[in-house]
Amino acid sequence: MSKAASLSIDDPAVDCPVPAETVGRLIKADPDTASFLLDGIPEATRARLAVWLYGRSHTHEIGIRVAASCDGATLRRAAGIVGNALYDLSRRPYAAPSHGTRSGGAGRISLGGSARRA
């Protein structure tokens, strides 16, 4: 009996579970087309794909949408506690991550240097 390795969003060396062309189509697809593309992928593979996509900042939202096509048990088997969190995120309205955003307070920064006085 072979056991599939658990995936982690912390491991960037993990290969994508689907061909790169499929990922490219998912990134460019509208929601209906994405659902059609996902229908042809087994649920366990979709769960691994959701974790893989979620772990990359530029495909974060797509990972959540792919996770919405999986049940909680499948996501847990694919990624443990990360799968639990991804399942929860996929069942509520998407909110973009707030890391890296400014919340005011700081002044503008100029790369041109200070103005010279004559």
Image (cartoon, rainbow, N blue to C red):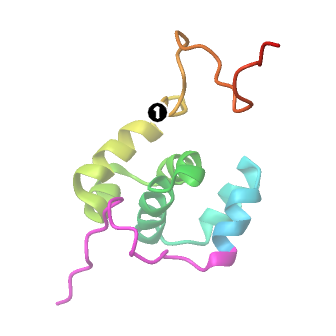
Location of residue 87 by image quarter: top left
List x then y, in percent, for residue 12: 40, 68
> From what the image shows, is residue 92 above or below residue 52?
above
Residue located at (21% from left, 81% from top): 3
Q: In the image, is 24 to the left or to the right of 87?
A: right
Check residue 11 for magenta coloring.
yes
Location of residue 22 by image quarter: bottom right
> From what the image shows, is residue 25 above or below residue 92?
below
Check disc 1 and give the amino acid type: His
Q: What element carries label 1?
A: loop
The quarter of the picture where the N terminus appears is bottom left
Nearest to the observer: residue 54 or residue 45: 54
User: How many residues crowd around disc 1 within 10 Å: few (fewer than 14), some, or many (20 or more)?
Assistant: few
Residue at the left extreme? 1
Task: Tell me the residue that label 1 is attached to.
Answer: 99
Q: Give the range drawn in magenta.
A: 1-21
Magenta span main SS = loop
